[in-house]
Image: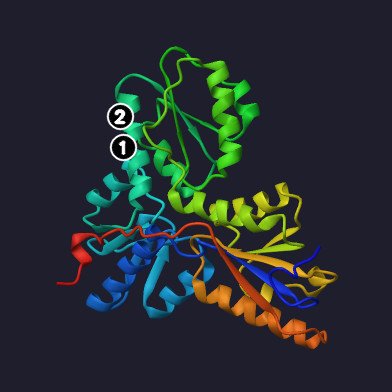
Amino acid sequence: MSVTANGPAGAPTVLLAAPRSFCAGVERAIAVVEQLLDQRGGPVYVRKQIVHNTHVVADLQARGAVFVEELDAVPAGATVVFSAHGVSPAVRTEAAERGLEVIDATCPLVTKVHAEARRFATRGDTVILIGHAGHEEVEGTLGEAPDRTVLVQNVDDVAALEIADPSRVSYLTQTTLAADETTEIVDALRARFPALRGPGSDDICYATTNRQDALTAIAEESDLVLVVGSTNSSNSVRLVELARRHGTPSYLIDDADGIRPEWLDGVRVVGLTAGASAPPRLVDAVIAALEQLSRIAGGRPLTVIERETTRETVYFTLPPAVRRS
């Protein structure tokens, strides 16, 4: 593979996908906790991880955030933040019953899916949710209309569906899925249920799609793809899978310490990206680590080339309770 059009012959090259790292929903959720800590001090209770990244969670814990699995770990009458992934109505009801002050950091694009679930169920449809079982976003969406919603994870699940009224069926998707695989599932649903209706606009969020498109633009030119993100980050895992579907070896790493030198044997071009919940500083640290490994191996300095496929300008306002005056 030649990279002489992009960098000096013989120099190791990093193709840096853009967009990458934080999206607007993640930035908003983190800012909610940071503002509460600044305004009120610790502890600030957060149900589940505010976003799925170990470094973000550790940083906020060090500042006074307390992450809990369920609301029974929050003192009665305290303030609790709901994570970016959203919660079910049952969780909201429990918070109200315990007198908790709720600050909702749910990503607005997840809130959109919840509203669609309620609307589709109210009009009498069976709602088919495409997503991954156990993911917090999926649990919250299922809770909007649990008696009328069924979960499918793949095409095989579609084949096994039994729907009471096939003429009244709608579908929704988790916001962090792989676009190409989701299309296959939707096509299978349409083949089984010709009357299938869906959302007015795609549920897979702009940031997930943009990061997948940016990775696609570099994957086939790369000998190896590294994705910065935590193992419970759905959109990060989807990026690894996408690179592999393009025939390129790919690994998910939480940070630079996750790089294994043997992965780089014979590699001249490293594709690099980060999931939407991974801090940009972690990408910078990976580049520095790759530079160091190259020098140790006696190679030339890295050539870093950013490939930007689109420019993101989305911004979500903070909840009124934490906005600065």
Q: Is residue 122 above or below residue 129?
A: above
Is disc 2 placed on a helix, strand or loop? helix
Gap between marks 1 and 2 measured at Cα? 6 Å
- Residue extending furthest toward the front: 5
Picture quarter with the N terminus: bottom right
- Image position, residue 58 (x, y; %): 48, 74
**Do the residues bearing badges 1 and 2 touch, measured as CB atoms within 8 Å?**
yes
Q: Residue furthest right?
A: 266
Q: Position of residue 249 (x, y in %)?
A: 76, 57
Residue at the location (71% across, 47% down)? 245
The residue lying at 77 percent from left, 84 percent from top is: 300
User: How far from the left and from the top, in percent, is residue 158?
Assistant: 59, 25
Tell me the residue at 30%/66% (across/down).
32
Let me know if residue 324 appears in the view.
Answer: yes
Q: At 45% from the left edge and 42% from the top edge, which residue is drawn? A: 139
Q: Residues within 10 Å of mark 2 (few under 14, many from 20)?
A: some
Task: Determine whether 85 is above or below 149 in the image.
Answer: below
The residue pinned by badge 1 equals: 115
Q: Which mark is residue 119?
A: 2
